[in-house]
């Protein structure tokens, strides 16, 4: 790379040649500016505007009123609790499951290609459409309760019932894991395939069991990918919404108690037309994600430093 | 431990990598598997370690049949071409790893590792990681890791090919020293004939999965079993002069003169052959039986490397620089007994 640019600097270039590459980048930058940068800046501004009116686009002044209002709303804290709950369940469980499945897929057994496509299927389906299918499966007389019946268990009111709060969350988490699994598996599988098979052979010759190879060799070598997966999944789980929406017919849980932060933002916006609160909640969510991601990166740096010293 | 390989064959689909290989490796010997790439030497090594099973034949460690025994049960130490040191573990943990799997207590592990690290001279590097070591140091660590479990058999798969020329020389002496200290039966795979000649007690030279010669290094050089062996060993490569035997004399292709050597006695009439002579076997002698034309001369210090010609064939000879050859002139040469052979032109079979 370095050598390349050094060589280029030796060549004479006309003014147009210098500008040319930026012209090619322009359409993309325009798109980003209009559809990403502008809305983001607007959200930040709106969150500090008091009494914003959508109709007149006017506001009474700048302040932190929206934040005060959001942080004093018990529904918001409910949403934060639910979201954290969801993140802390889905991220670790999906990571462990994906590690196991990716390892199996990496064994190059007969038919593993077929399994690969089956596992990756959720990636190419629409969450909302599949959510409806899961809704049927979680139904009182759905497949899941039918199978549980075989195990001698009573039907579980996954999606309804007055006392169904915990079950609601379970259903959401199961669906969430299913949804996130393929992407996680793809990342881990490509990480596994990048590990030199010689390490495995060397460990085998040194009489290591498969379990020891997995924990002592494979997982440490896979650590960078595992960290990446954790960060990406944490971010996407914090933004959980499209899994929730179809499962309960557009409601946040059967009791209306399964608010997630994004659902809260949406309700504030669409139902209460409170753009200020929605923007403030969005920024608070951003802060949460930021802190979590920084913490994960910090942990990673510490473990790496420990390795080097 | 001695190892017996009994009619080992390995086929991959319709490709035969190793064909009917039989050999006995004596206890404490360092054996070189030598041959060009694709000759089956690494395949053979992998069968000894148990990484791949043979298609036919048997392998015995002492008297035990280990043919189908998985690698983890064989107790062999393996040094990989690219070392395969675990990058996330320290040198100490790398060396300890084979003991870790045997559930040796940590204190004992570390003690043994320190001892073996001293033997291979990496005892000051124990806290580093493989990425912070030079190629030669990684090589030493890899050897330490292979040795720490007291292997019955030490296998080295082209261990020097990733090192630069000077380090290669140093490490091959090191491997020899360590092997003689530990007296472990060792198999060393290489395609470098010089390396093989320098390091081993015995060389098994292979070509296309078939053993060409299994002999002492010097014997391999001094009395090659066939044309391939003669060509493979020696630098510069042996001179092959094509010609025909007629009336007990050798007629080089395109030459009028006849070469008469005692060696040719009893050779079949009219047979197309190679007269193969090592470059160091020539000497200039006034009444020598070989007449050749001097083409070029390169000074090498104590001697000269001369490019000479007989008929249509150019060949190289080391000549004492005191002789003072002149390009364009003819010269009479004699040959020593050692380093002169006659091979069948077609089959490469040794005739004399």
Image: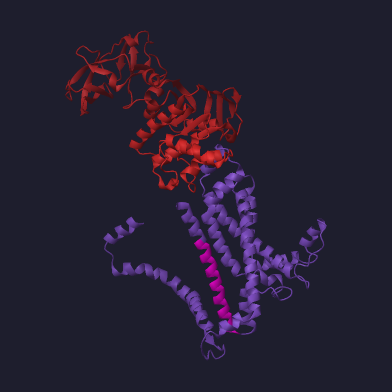
Asked whether residue A297 is drawn in magenta, I would say yes
| Vertical order, B170 against B85 (above or below) | above
Main SS category, magenta section:
helix
Q: Which of the 4 quarters of the picture holds residue B310?
A: top left
Locate residue B213, reporting x and y percent: 45, 21
In the figure, the purple chain has which letter? A
Q: How is the image coloured?
A: by chain
Residue extending furthest front? B107
What residue do we see at 61% from left, 43% from top? A210
Horizontally, residue B162 falls left or right of residue B285, namely right
Q: Which of the 4 quarters of the picture holds residue B164?
A: top left
Locate residue A149, reporting x and y percent: 82, 59
Horizontally, residue B80 falls left or right of residue A243, namely left
Asked whether residue B207 is drawn in magenta, I would say no
Residue A23 vs residue A99, the one in the foreground: A99
Locate residue B302, reporting x and y percent: 21, 25
Horizontally, residue B245 falls left or right of residue B320, namely right
| Vertical order, B327 against A136 (above or below) | above
What residue do we see at 45% from left, 39% from top? B141
Residue B111 vs residue A296, the one in the foreground: B111
Q: Specify the colour of chain B.
A: red
| Vertical order, B202 against A33 (above or below) | above
| Vertical order, B231 against A283 (above or below) | above
Which range of residues does the magenta coloring cover? A274-298
Residue B69 vs residue A3, the one in the foreground: B69
């Amino acid at each position: 790379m370095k050598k390349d640019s050094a060589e280029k600097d030796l060549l004479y270039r006309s003014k147009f040649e210098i500008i040319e590459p930026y012209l090619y980048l322009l359409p993309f930058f325009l798109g980003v500016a209009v559809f990403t940068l502008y809305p983001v800046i607007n959200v930040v501004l709106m969150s500090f505007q008091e009494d914003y009116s959508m109709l007149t686009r006017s506001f009474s002044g700048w302040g932190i009123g929206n934040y005060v209002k959001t942080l004093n709303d018990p529904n918001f804290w409910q949403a934060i609790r639910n979201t954290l709950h969801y993140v802390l369940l889905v991220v670790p469980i999906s990571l462990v499951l994906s590690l196991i499945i990716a390892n199996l897929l990496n064994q190059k057994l007969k038919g593993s290609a077929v399994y690969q496509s089956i596992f990756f299927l959720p990636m190419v389906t629409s969450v909302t459409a599949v959510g409806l299918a899961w809704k049927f499966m979680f139904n009182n007389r759905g497949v899941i309760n039918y199978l549980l019946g075989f195990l001698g268990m009573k039907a579980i009111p996954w999606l309804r019932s007055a006392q169904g709060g915990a079950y609601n969350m379970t259903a959401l988490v199961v669906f969430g894991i299913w949804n996130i699994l393929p992407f996680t598996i793809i990342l881990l599988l490509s990480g596994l395939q990048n590990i030199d098979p010689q390490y495995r052979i060397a460990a085998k010759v040194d009489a290591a069991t498969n379990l020891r190879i997995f924990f002592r060799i494979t997982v440490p070598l896979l650590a960078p990918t595992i960290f990446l997966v954790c960060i990406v999944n944490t971010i996407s789980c914090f933004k959980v919404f499209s899994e929730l929406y179809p499962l309960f017919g557009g409601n946040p849980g059967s009791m209306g108690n399964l608010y997630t932060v994004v659902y809260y933002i949406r309700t504030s916006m669409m139902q209460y037309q409170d753009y200020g609160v929605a923007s403030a909640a969005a920024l608070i969510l951003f802060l949460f994600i930021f802190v979590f991601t920084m913490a994960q990166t910090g942990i990673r740096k510490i473990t790496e430093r420990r390795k080097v010293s | 431990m001695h190892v017996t390989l009994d009619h080992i064959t390995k086929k991959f689909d319709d490709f035969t990598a190793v064909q009917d290989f039989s050999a006995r490796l004596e206890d404490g010997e360092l054996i070189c598997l030598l041959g060009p790439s694709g000759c089956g030497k690494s395949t053979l090594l992998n069968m000894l370690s148990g990484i791949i099973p043979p298609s036919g034949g048997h392998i015995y460690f002492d008297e035990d049949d280990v043919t189908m025994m998985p690698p983890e049960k064989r107790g062999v130490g393996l040094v990989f071409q690219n070392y395969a040191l675990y990058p996330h573990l320290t040198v100490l943990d790398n060396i300890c790893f084979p003991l870790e799997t045997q559930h040796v207590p940590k204190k004992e592990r570390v003690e043994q590792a320190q001892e073996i690290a001293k033997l291979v001279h990496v005892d000051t590097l124990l806290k580093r990681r493989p990425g912070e070591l030079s190629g030669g140091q990684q090589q030493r660590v890899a050897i330490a890791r292979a040795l720490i479990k007291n292997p019955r058999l030490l296998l080295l798969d082209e261990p020097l090919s990733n090192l630069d020329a000077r380090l290669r020389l140093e490490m091959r002496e090191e491997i020899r020293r360590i092997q003689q200290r530990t007296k472990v039966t060792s198999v060393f795979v290489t395609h470098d004939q010089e390396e093989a000649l320098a390091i081993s007690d015995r060389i098994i030279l292979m070509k296309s999965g078939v053993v060409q010669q299994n002999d002492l290094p010097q014997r391999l050089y001094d009395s090659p079993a066939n044309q391939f062996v003669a060509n493979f060993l020696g630098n510069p490569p042996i001179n092959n002069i094509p010609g025909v035997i007629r009336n007990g004399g050798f007629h080089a292709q395109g030459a009028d003169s006849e070469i008469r050597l005692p060696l040719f006695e009893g050779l079949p009439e009219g047979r197309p052959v190679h007269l193969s002579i090592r470059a160091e076997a020539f000497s200039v002698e006034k009444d020598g039986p070989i007449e050749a034309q001097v083409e070029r001369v390169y000074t090498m210090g104590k001697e000269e490397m001369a490019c000479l010609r007989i008929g249509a064939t150019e060949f190289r000879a080391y000549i004492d620089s005191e002789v003072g050859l002149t390009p364009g002139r003819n010269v009479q040469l004699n040959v020593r007994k050692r380093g002169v052979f006659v091979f069948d032109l077609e089959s490469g079979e040794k005739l004399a």
